[in-house]
Image: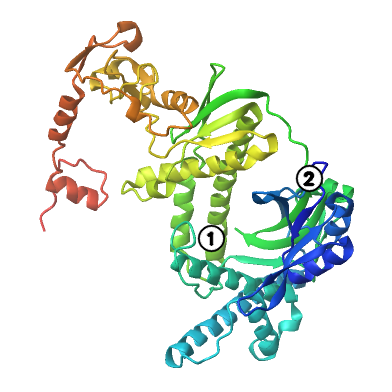
Amino acid sequence: MGGGWVSLLIEARTHAQAAAIARVSGGVRLTRVTGDGEVKETRQVRVPDFEAVSAQVEAVTLMFRLYDETPDGLVQVGNGWSFRGYKFEVAWPQEAERRDLIRGHFGACRKAYNVALGWVKDDLDARAKDPKHESTPWRMDALRLRWNTQKNQVAPWWAEYSKEAYAAGIADLATALKNWSASKHGTRKGRRVGFPRFKSKRTARKSVRFTTGVMRLGEDRRTIVLPRIGALRSKENTRALQRRLAKGDARILSMTLSEHAGRLFVSVQAAVRATPVVAPAYPDATAGVDVGMRTLATASDSLGHTVEFENPRAYKAALVELRREQRKLARRLPGSRGYERSKAKTARLHERVSNIRRAHHHQVATWLVGTYGHVVIEDLAVSAMMQSLNRRFRRCVADAGMGGLLALIALKADKTGTQVTRADRWFPSSQIHHGCGCILTDPHPSFRGARPVKMSKALVCIRTGELVDRDVNAAHNLRDWPEGNPSVLAQLEPAPRPVAVTAPAATVGGPEKVTNPDLVSARKSVTKKPAPSAGRAAVRRDEARTDPNLAAPAA
């Protein structure tokens, strides 16, 4: 917060918080006039000197918005706090009673969700028959009030678990209904959201969220305390958050206990005081980042350096073991001990693949935002790429996780003040030759003799015959991408497409001429592999390891 602010406007989340802020700060609550002429108080409070009363306001709540009143209107300013999440893995308790208590909280959260959803569906059916039927509003407070009045009938055992378990399930349903309604009316971005469905014990995500009660981290940095569940032993050091809590620079807002692949995790959402921004190593340098499946990221900066980050291909490395475990799981009897063991092992393999991919993405994103002051990234439609009919292509896209890497770069940029620019989605960065501006084409098969780069990554310039690495070329184009003009193709002059192009022998390392790519593609489309014979198909169907040329035995 900068000095010199005299009058600021605070917007609280609730009217009760707004009244408390006005009482402790000496501010004035703003009012509005309704359509009926009634004057009502709003959630906005005008304080004369925010810096003098900031401690009192933060003692009431940290989840407020701060606005500066200017002649042009209200301008939101930072209030000095940001929200961050911390995730720690904890060990399962050794006592069977406590393990059952944790699983019971998961079930209580799911029970409240399903019961409230049943009420919503019953109200919809009743409204369809009688338009005058009074339905319960789809709000958290209204649904929870109905739960409190009927919990003795729908869940006589409700007192065995924390009230936060039921509140978390109802809050999740209220959010799901809100998302469905916004998606139906076209006010929500992203893919279409369907109507909420009942949660199954076998397929639903096992989690419960606590917002009140005893929630703290132990001073030994190995203990996490939750309401009703007690202390859990953390497998990871909690010093990243414990240091901020000890200094008063962080406050815990909620804790979420969840189970995934047989492992227990605690996610802590905390409000953290903003820290000074650490400038990147080269604040004046610009880097273009091209992401792909062969090489995860290729960065080309304005200093003349090009850095490539390899794709770990964690899923491909674990695919053999995954197939073996999934075949074992398919042979097990559902519900048996062997089935549960195989299911848990398969889930652990998927978790390991996800962890390897996520760790690599964090390392690449941290290095990029910590090195350059301006990063230009692509705007890829990963969801559209995942709809391809080629299964291998979809698998490679999922294994690379390009969308997650781009999101991490934009998320981590705030820590260093790095400016992140997204290039236009339709900008063909790989097809425009950075050297001369022509349209690059696929190389002729005659270049397969000598490969300066992988032929799958190589494109040929139709003017010079030079082989160009498509990833490096795309990084160069992204680095020089004009922010004000997303359509670079409109400025390019169409280059002539010659029938034959002479290529420098030193650069290409192959024959002197490149055949017209149009003729090559036409020749490829004509050439087809012969269909397998009946004997070969029969042998493959029977999975025999004999000579496929042998005739099938007579019936």
Q: Residue 27 placed where, x, y %?
A: 84, 62
Q: Is residue 511 above or below residue 422?
A: above
Q: Amino acid at mark 1?
A: Lys
Q: Which quarter of the figure has residue 178?
A: bottom right
Q: Are marks 2 and 1 in contact (CB under 8 Å)?
A: no
Foreground disc of the pair 2, 1: 2
Which disc, if any, is residue 343?
1
Residue 229 visible in image: no
User: Residue at the spot x=53%, y=16% of the render?
Assistant: 304
In what quadrant of the picture does the C terminus appear? bottom left
Q: Residue 313 placed where, x, y %?
A: 49, 38
Which disc, if any, is residue 240?
2
Q: Which quarter of the figure has residue 41?
A: bottom right
State left or right for residue 210 relative to residue 532: right
Q: Residue 448 placed where, x, y %?
A: 29, 19
Secondary element at tag 2: helix
The answer for how far apart the CA atoms under marks 2 and 1 are is 33 Å
Tell me how the rendering is colored: rainbow
